[in-house]
Image (tube, helix red, strand yellow):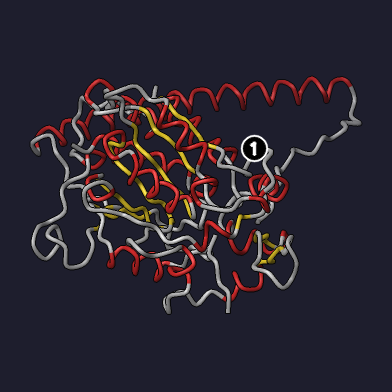
Amino acid sequence: MGICLSTESPPRKNHSKRVTNQSTTSANSNSSNRWSRVRSLSSKREKFDDAMIHEHAIAAALLFQQNGGVLPFDRSTSLRHPPGSANSKRHNPLPRSSSTRPRSVADPLLPPQQLLNQDLNLDELETSHIVLVHGGGFGAWCWYKTIALLEECKFKVTAIDLTGSGIDLFDTNSIKSLSQYVTPLIDFFEKLTDGEKVILVGHDFGGSCISYAMELFPSKISKAIFMAASMLKSGQSTLDMFSQKENTNDLMRKAQKFIYTNGNNLPPTAIDLDKMLLKDLLFNHSPPKDVALASVSMRPIPFPPVLEKLSLSDSNYGKVRRFYIETPDDNAIPIALQQSMINQSPPEKVFRIKASDHSPFFSKPQALHKLLVEIAKLT
């Protein structure tokens, strides 16, 4: 959710036409015999094809072993370092991703999701508890695909409903500050036991919210992941960030509707988004069913927290390892604005989900899951 003040139908199955045979009983018998012969020939042909495939597979495996048991695979391009950083490509080549290691003949031919799970040992991680913080107008509901995928890998997952969001019943128009808005997140951290750490993930305006928590609880956060999110500098507000020249977002200006609960002569209390423009703004690559879910679940965004400037210190906020996930086809926080934030406050590493809209938890859930696991495994 940026703040600016100034389907293809599924393919039809070709069903076989049902033909009513008007011939005599003898003709029916002849037809039945003829189809029996066709099926017999088809069965023999399939067995022959299976035998050929088996022979080809054996030949390929032998050739593979003769070449040393490896094939050259291109490295993943999902990982990018901030320009000018110490880890820039000009100074140091990108490390190979664990997902692109050379294959061996002994490797099982499993689906990518199962291969990812197979290589994961939660006992080797600093923490396997991931906390998901939604963006402006969203709620914990938006993470349902991500939660399912992470829990399948045996991660512990907590999705937070911020004040006035999701199923939290507080009136959005009555929220006066960022601290009030993030109270559920603060309550969560205060209940963590000593020595317990989590990986904190923030989307959209949730980036400002996790930054607030990073300043208060740096010892309880193993890593912080900003996903298409506001990643601010100290003394900067979310509104300041969205007012930058890199944000040329006319669609957001058209979509946002200010709510003046206290009267038109006072500042807005909240921002709502035009339901007719939600798909183009936030979900331009997302499935229709998820767009429908969002259209009936999204709530107004409290305005005072958007105006609040953050106070971030190197001794607290700066101690937490930060990562950023870019969404290049984002119409809410354009990629130019994302990269401006990255350049102004470089994180440890930058990742990119190709062809993702503003909501990769809907449009690219598998790719998002892969990156979250990859970041969790970083030492």
Q: Position of residue 133 (x, y in %)?
A: 48, 42
Give the vertical position of 195 relative to 369 (above or below).
above
Between 84 and 190, the residue placed more toward the observer is 190
Name the quarter where the N terminus is drawn. bottom right
Q: Position of residue 120 (x, y in %)?
A: 28, 26
Number of numbered discs present? 1
Image check: 184 left or right of 277? left
Residue with the mark numbered 1: 168
Name the quarter where the C terminus is drawn. top left
Image check: 320 left or right of 357? left
Q: Residue at x 49, y 67 (%)?
A: 239
Say what amino acid the circle numbered 1 marks.
Asp
Q: Residue at x 55, y 26 (%)?
A: 41
Between 314 and 352, the residue placed more toward the observer is 314
Q: Residue at x 41, y 69 (%)?
A: 337
Q: Residue at x 12, y 32 (%)?
A: 65
Image check: 84 left or right of 229? left
Dot 1, how many residues are within 10 Å of its Cα: few (below 14), some (14-19), or many (20+)? some
Q: Position of residue 268 (x, y in %)?
A: 66, 65
Between 138 and 287, the residue placed more toward the observer is 138
Q: In what element is the residue under mark 1?
A: loop
Q: Position of residue 189 (x, y in %)?
A: 40, 32
Residue 347 quadrant = bottom left
Image check: 260 left or right of 161? right
